[in-house]
Amino acid sequence: MTRFGFRVTHRDGGARRGLLTTAHGEVDTPAFMPVGTQGAVKGMTHRDLDSIGAALLLSNTYHLYLRPGDDLIARRGGLHRFIGWSKPILTDSGGYQVFSLASRRTIDEEGAHFQSHLDGSAHLLTPEKATDIQAQLGSDMAMVLDECLAHPAEPTVARRSMERTLRWARRARDRFLALRDDRVTGVTITNPHQAQLGIVQGGVFAELRRDSVAATVDIGFDGYAIGGLSVGESTEQMYEVLSSCVPSMPDAQLRYLMGAGTPEDLVESVARGIDLFDCVLPTRNGRNGQLFTSRGRINIKNARYAEDDRPPDSACGCYTCRTFSRAYLRHLFMAGEIGAATLNTLHNLHFYLDTLRRIRESVAFGRFESFRLAFHQSLSGQPIDF
Amino acid sequence: MTRFGFRVTHRDGGARRGLLTTAHGEVDTPAFMPVGTQGAVKGMTHRDLDSIGAALLLSNTYHLYLRPGDDLIARRGGLHRFIGWSKPILTDSGGYQVFSLASRRTIDEEGAHFQSHLDGSAHLLTPEKATDIQAQLGSDMAMVLDECLAHPAEPTVARRSMERTLRWARRARDRFLALRDDRVTGVTITNPHQAQLGIVQGGVFAELRRDSVAATVDIGFDGYAIGGLSVGESTEQMYEVLSSCVPSMPDAQLRYLMGAGTPEDLVESVARGIDLFDCVLPTRNGRNGQLFTSRGRINIKNARYAEDDRPPDSACGCYTCRTFSRAYLRHLFMAGEIGAATLNTLHNLHFYLDTLRRIRESVAFGRFESFRLAFHQSLSGQPIDF
């Protein structure tokens, strides 16, 4: 098994191409992680994901902790073995889901008290507990528990929250190192090569973001994520936060933008130095009948597609576009067929992964700026539902 | 393009192996058709079906007529082109669905008056209309409209119904020949090599069944189906009907048992001379979490599988069994993941298709009887949920 590592292999302006190494294989970056919330990407089999070149998955600690439980997964040998996925996995900390899904949650310095959205049972998620759960899951990259701030927030509120996130990060790191040094009992470490990433917070405030970066880097993690974006702020605000954060993040380490975004967001974030992404847009929107294409988005339930024999995206080489017409995909969606979710999701994920492939190639050949321009030109001025 | 044809290539006792030829390719028989009601097998992509060797599909005329409509499908060039499936397709007549799904249906000599289960709109399905719709769909094998008798039925009721089915069969055949001879306007024939199969009815009454066979064969079709079984009669009654029907059916033509059955039913029906099957059991039960295996059925939601690391069927080579444990499949099912439907359905269809493969091989090598014995022995005496 290989230890966790990351190195930048090419640079082009602010964009970088890199190689992420884990015990479960290597990943070329910039990379996009399909979201497999409950240990499966909704509508996809693992071999569907293989067929479109998915190199790593994100899975949600909150969901797996509640069902089937991290103890059960640890007894199965960890998440990789349990779900039959041999490539890298990143797990989040569960914090975001506690804030967005759980009922009756209260946050204090200790952690997040909440009730399960499944059965109402009471739970406490602390920085230590989130670290322990992920150790039992055995993901290749674990995230620290952070406090998720609602947008918009006052600067003073945002600072208090950011500072709590820092104290939690310190506790999470201490726990992670204690687990690594075998100083914790009752936790089964199913992947001894797990890495831990810190999370930068601070809302849309440049100064808070810079303070957060400095203090998080001071704790010292195997990579750094930017959290608290894609929560309702404008695109411009998001790009500004990236511009204010990224330059002070360690150049030699992995940079992960959490929960973003549209295809355009990915290109713009890579331009600002981001290496890793996850987002539910391609999967969730696919299930809702929205397809991302090189010429804009298509809402497949639109009546105009009822007799449209074209593929969703004539520039796309995915199984869906090679095989099926908009007319058929609309029929499947209108008829409530499971296959609609599968074929739409497959296309959307292929579009995302293919965009990342093209980004990596353009960075390697020093042509990122021309790719970026062409990408935006292809999308701009196109009507939705062409 | 090749015209429709069928020939028996091997015999072993009452069982036969054959070769079905259509404009969309050849099919080795005995064969099983996965049910793609609305032009898709629920939970499967076409390439999933390819991967398990599905050689032909059944699709439902009732559903496609109501949505998206046979006119729309004809404008797309027929069902094969519309759904992107290049191998053979059989369509039913819509009769069974009118009887089981439609509301406010009344049957008279003209046909079946009913209201759509989708929007309550009023429709009339006649023998001619069912033939026209299937001509527009362009399936490789079309079925005549038959009257579906409820079980149990009195002999006199069963005879009246069987005789109406015969009159309808005559009208359907006349219409089919008129379409072929270009004597009908307003119907787009999307597959000039479509074949038409007659349907034998008569309930569980041997004499009615024999009369129905004789009169249906007298009309003259490209093959013959046995309808009105798998509607609540006992297994013994079904086997008795087969034994009373099949010997008087034309030896050189295709014999299709509609809507059956369990894996055991398939083996026993082949022993009685059946060549073709369709059934929703592997797909519907798969979505409900029931897996057919070589040792009996498994209900995957059973708590006993929560920590069971074995594949569903250790004798099975399907993607599901090669990759996933019962514990993971149970998790997916309990979590309501779409992938549960896909992986369970894939296994069940593989099990059905593999059973047919083994049947064909055993017939070709003159070992059907020993296969039949071993198959039943493997299943018998096994507890459900082992």
Image (spheres, coloured by chain):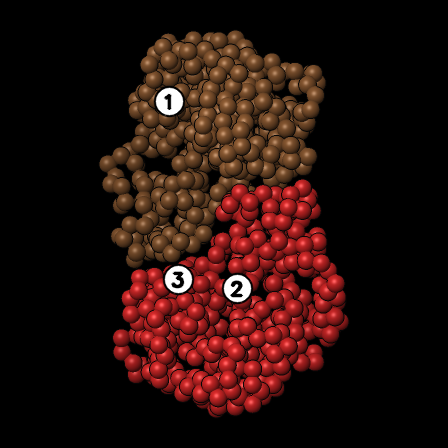
Chain colours: A red, B brown
Amino acid type, mark 2: Val
Q: Residue at x 29, y 70 (%)?
A: A122
- Where is residue B308 shown, x and y percent of the image? 30, 55
Front residue of A233/B184: it is: A233
Amino acid type, mark 1: Ala
Image quarter of residue A160: bottom left
Element on which disc 3 rests: helix
Please indicate, yes or no, whether residue A89 appears anywhere in the rendered image: yes
Quadrant containing the N terminus of chain B is top right
**Label whose residue precedes the other's in the sequence (3 or 2):** 3
Q: Chain of mark 1?
A: B
Q: Residue at x 53, y 73 (%)?
A: A231
Q: Label 3, on which residue?
A: A81
Q: CA distance from mark 2 to mark 1?
A: 49 Å
* Lateral position of residue A297 relative to residue A144, left or right: right
Front residue of A335/B231: it is: A335
Q: Which mark is residue A280?
A: 2
Amino acid type, mark 3: Arg
Q: CA distance from mark 3 to mark 1?
A: 50 Å
* Lateral position of residue A13 relative to residue A341, left or right: right
Element on which disc 1 rests: loop
Choose mark 3 or mark 2, whichever is in front. 2
In the rendered image, the vertical position of residue A376 relative to residue B191, given as above or below: below
Q: Label 1, on which residue?
A: B150
- Where is residue B242 shown, x and y percent of the image? 38, 18
Choose mark 3 or mark 1, whichever is in front. 1
